[in-house]
Amino acid sequence: MKIGDVQLKSEILFAPIAGFSDVGFRHLCARYGAGVTYTELVSAKGLVYGNKGTDELIATTDIETPCAVQLFGSDPEYMYRAASDERLAKFDIVDINMGCPVKKVFSNGDGCAVMQYPSLVTELVQAAAEGSKKPVTVKMRAGVAGIPLAVECAVAAQRGGAAAVTVHPRYREQFYSGRADHSVTRAVKAAVSIPVIANGDIVDASSLEAVRAQSGADAFMVARGALGRPYIFSELAGKPYEFDVREAVRTQVRVMREVMSDRVVANLMKMHMCYYFKGENCAKQVRVAAGEAKCVEDIFAIADAFAKR
Ligand SMILES: Cc1cc2nc3c(=O)[nH]c(=O)nc-3n(C[C@H](O)[C@H](O)[C@H](O)COP(=O)(O)O)c2cc1C
């Protein structure tokens, strides 16, 4: 499977997830065979103006290949300037976020709000493609306020030169609840000639097969199903793998520490620790301990105390 001229490592991709797609966790997902890893959403304007924290978001490691940077914004001029920024040269793909439902983003006309204006969709893709000279993709939802927009938005993205589109078929108002309706993904697939990536509710082999059958998509993207389970990419590919939570935590932290302060690392790791132990008998104890963690050493101590031996 290719996106533009970029050969993917597999057809199962790791989604952008704000607060979780840090460089350390993406490193683990790539190691376990994610076909592409995406940064969390990065403001095109923020990148241009050198906002604090942007460099942490766009850090990558060598095994993250191919990797995509996800930009959000609704001004083609800033989209062009961000996409042409030298700091993004290491990315293979530029993805544009047209799915974020959060009020702060939406009310600014960004994220999912862009879907309401097909000509803007085309312009943003054109601007990113001109700026980056890389394949540009768009990640979108089913629509806004019950109005289906995915097909129109995908066609508009293709018109602008998009190399692929990802469909997370929930409406903006659903945020992440309810079932993803992959008949929407199928309708998009029928309407465009570029690859279509299906996202939403893929958590194991049987849900992957269900989404494959329902959507007819070319590739598949996992978000929440990978939290605490970066090995899901090996699992879904039917490849043997080993997972030791103590090793995973230490590797993730080591990679994060190269670009983040220990305070930021410890804070981000709190939520990851809850996911690493989710569903286990000790899950509640881990949540309490993670809530009280003050530093990276506290995070390591949780991994050591609760890992099965
Ligand atoms: C906490 C959280 C943060 C997210 N951040 C992003 C983001 O930065 N960019 C994006 O395109 N989607 C984001 N998403 C949406 C996911 O990429 C994905 O589309 C959605 O969770 C559905 O996939 P899933 O059912 O596999 O979780 C986020 C989702 C969650 C739950």
Image (tube, rainbow, N blue to C red):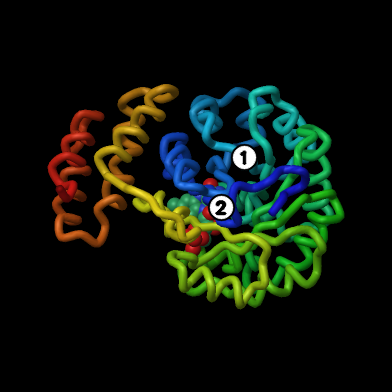
Q: Secondary structure at mark 1?
A: loop
Image x and y of residue 9, in percent = 60, 47
Q: Residue at x 73, y 54 (%)?
A: 164
Residue corresponding to mark 2: 13
Q: Residue at x 64, y 40 (%)?
A: 71
Q: Is residue 13 above or below residue 291?
A: below
Check disc 1 and give the amino acid type. Answer: Pro
Q: Is residue 222 above or below residue 208?
A: above
Which label belongs to residue 66?
A: 1
Image x and y of residue 4, in percent = 77, 47
Decide if residue 190 is on the left or right side of residue 245: right
Q: CA distance from mark 2 to mark 1?
A: 10 Å
Image x and y of residue 309, in percent = 15, 48
Among all residues in the image, which is located at the extreme right? 159
Of the two numbered discs 2 and 1 on the same chain, state the one appearing first in sequence: 2
Decide if residue 268 is on the left or right side of residue 293: right
Check disc 2 and give the amino acid type. Answer: Leu
Number of numbered markers: 2
